Image: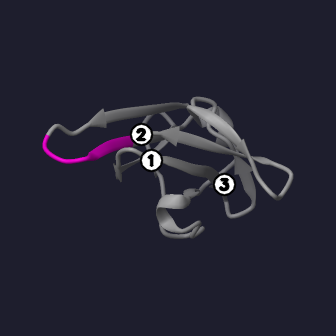
Amino acid sequence: MSLVKKFLKTKPECKVTFVLDKEACKDGSRVNLVGDFNEWDKEVTVLKKNKNGDYSVTLDLETGKDYHYRYLIDGEKWVNDWEADYYAPTEYNSENSVVRL
């Protein structure tokens, strides 16, 4: 997995590419990115499967914020990002991945 940040010089935004490694979802067929930036909607942000088997999506996010997120595989299995900037505990006795911009 990787998390790639490209800060824009012309506006307070960052292009963030979220990548879920093929090993983390080897039996999965659909991966969604769910987090603060999409109001925790489990359907709206679908990752595309790359030729190498990884899944990825790029979002434009406002800088100066921390965004909590997780990956959802096949609508059932929650996975954290191994490359997150840090992890934050949740009220559900788990942790969210967090990207700091």
Front-most of residues 31 and 4? 4
Amino acid under label 1?
Lys
Front-most of residues 60 and 25? 60
Answer whether labels 1 and 2 touch (C-beta < 8 Å).
yes
Which dot marks residue 101? 2
Foreground tag (3 vs 2): 2
Mark 2: few/some/many CA within 10 Å (<14, 14-19, 20+): some
Which dot marks residue 73? 3
- In whole angstroms, how far apart are the C-alphas of marks 1 and 2? 5 Å
- For mark 3, give the secondary structure: strand
Answer whether labels 3 and 2 touch (C-beta < 8 Å).
no
Front-most of residues 57 and 12? 12
- Mark 1 or 3, nearer chain start: 1
Q: Quadrant of the N terminus?
A: top right
Q: Residue 80's x, y, as percent? A: 67, 42
Residue at x-position 13% and y-position 43%: 10
Q: Going by the image, does 4 lie left or right of 12?
A: right
Figure quadrant of residue 98: top right
- In whole angstroms, how far apart are the C-alphas of marks 1 and 3? 26 Å
Q: Going by the image, does 74 lie left or right of 15?
A: right
Residue at x-position 59% and y-position 66%: 40
Amino acid under label 3?
Ile
The residue beneath circle 1 is: 65
Residue at x-position 59% and y-position 51%: 69
Magenta span includes 97: no
Stretch in magenta: 10-16
- Mark 1 or 2, nearer chain start: 1
Q: Residue 42's x, y, as percent? A: 60, 68
- For mark 1, give the secondary structure: loop
Amino acid under label 2?
Leu
